[in-house]
């Protein structure tokens, strides 16, 4: 299959899978504030609750620069709900791509542009480890690392969520953005903060907010974070949640698209080198055009950087 035909095939999968849900775009996303656990497997931190706020990126960029200057690694935590024909509001994709608990062949994890398969084979990224998680919610965690020309060392932590666990996946995404569930691990002699300790939190997969609303904890810490939501029309659905969690929307989307890992890769190349949200947006669009042959302008217009 040629690159052009592959791109058109994947774009067709996305348009088909999201077309029924896209009509449900709300003018304003409604949120309900509750102090509930996002999942049963994690414990909620009890911190000072602050009101919703639209933050700017200056303080975040300064924090990233400070970490690089001190030789501390930057950490990205990506949450990936596996494509699921039976349990997500999509028109089914090919059976072998849409098994929501099949790590090996899933469209968003194990196939060529799936998060694990892509970064495992991507030049410049080193696969540090993959672990099965003793949980019905998170099936596997894979970690990758790369050093960039400005000496930034970036760890990418990717969690594969079972396709029938979209709600806890979304709840955890927003909980991490709010600073909850700070955790650490030791990798290559580095102490790596992840979950609520990561610098950038990524949601990559089907836009579950098209099918449901979730209760989101209010921001609990002043160390604001960046979020990236690579899912269909995330600008319309996620923005109010970013306000609620006091996070900055580095990259979100304006229309239907295939959430290939190549988008995350190209954005991280700019992000790690402290480029602006606009430069990250252009990188996302150019990556999408490169793989999907949709036209450079069309690709860039699929993404939005910042508010």
Image (cartoon, grey):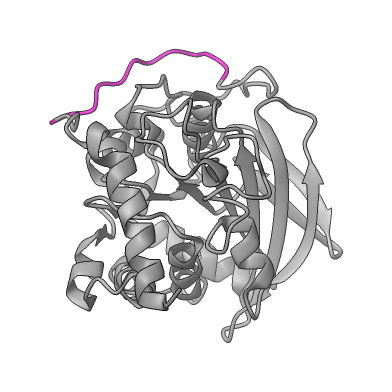
Q: Nearer the viewer, residue 26 or 56?
A: 26
Q: Quadrant of the N terminus?
A: bottom left
The main secondary structure of the magenta stretch is: loop
Which residue is at a point 41% across and 54% down the rendered structure image? 259
**244 vs 66: above or below:** above
Which residue is at a point 24% across and 33% down the rendered structure image? 20
Given the current orientation, which residue lies at the most extreme right position? 189
Which residue is at a point 22% across and 37% down the rendered structure image? 22
Q: State yes or no: residue 34 in magenta.
A: yes
Given the current orientation, which residue lies at the most extreme bottom position? 149
- Residue 6, percent across and down? 41, 68
- Residue 160, percent across and down? 63, 42
**249 vs 85: above or below:** below
Query: Which residues fall within the magenta stretch?
Result: 27-37
Q: Nearer the viewer, residue 129 or 148?
A: 129
Can residue 161 be seen here? The reply is yes
Lateral position of residue 20 relative to residue 283, left or right: left
Can residue 70 be seen here? The reply is no
Q: Nearer the viewer, residue 134 or 306?
A: 134
- Residue 65, percent across and down? 53, 70
Which residue is at a point 53% across and 46% down the rendered structure image? 97
- Residue 24, percent across and down? 19, 29
Q: State yes or no: residue 305 in magenta.
A: no
**109 vs 294: above or below:** above
């Amino acid at each position: 299959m040629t690159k052009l035909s592959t791109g058109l095939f994947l774009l067709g999968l996305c348009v088909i899978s999201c077309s029924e849900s896209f009509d449900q775009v709300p003018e304003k996303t409604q949120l309900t504030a509750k102090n509930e656990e996002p999942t049963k497997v994690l414990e909620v931190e009890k911190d000072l609750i602050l009101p919703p706020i639209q933050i700017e990126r200056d303080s975040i960029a300064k924090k990233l620069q400070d970490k690089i200057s001190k030789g501390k690694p930057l950490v990205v935590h990506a949450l990936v709900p596996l494509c699921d024909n039976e349990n997500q509001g999509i028109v089914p994709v090919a059976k072998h791509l849409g098994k929501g608990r099949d790590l090996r062949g899933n469209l968003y994890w194990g196939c060529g542009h799936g998060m694990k398969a892509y970064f495992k084979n991507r030049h410049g990224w080193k696969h540090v480890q993959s672990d099965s998680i003793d949980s019905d919610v998170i099936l596997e965690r894979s970690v990758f690392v790369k050093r960039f020309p400005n000496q930034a060392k970036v760890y990418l932590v990717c969690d594969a969520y079972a396709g029938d666990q979209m709600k806890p996946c979304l709840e955890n995404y927003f909980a991490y953005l709010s600073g909850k569930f700070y955790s650490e691990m030791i990798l290559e002699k580095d102490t790596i903060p992840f979950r609520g300790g990561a610098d950038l939190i990524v949601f990559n997969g089907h836009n579950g907010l098209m099918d449901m609303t979730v209760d989101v904890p209010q921001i609990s810490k002043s160390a604001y974070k960046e979020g990236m939501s690579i899912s269909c029309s995330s600008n319309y659905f996620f923005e109010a949640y970013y306000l609620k969690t006091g996070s900055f929307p580095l990259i979100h989307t304006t229309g239907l698209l295939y959430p290939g890992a190549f988008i995350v890769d190209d954005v991280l190349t700019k992000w790690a080198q402290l480029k602006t949200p606009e430069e990250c947006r252009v990188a996302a669009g150019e990556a999408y055009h490169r793989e999907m042959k949709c036209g450079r302008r069309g690709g860039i217009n699929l993404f939005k950087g910042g508010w």
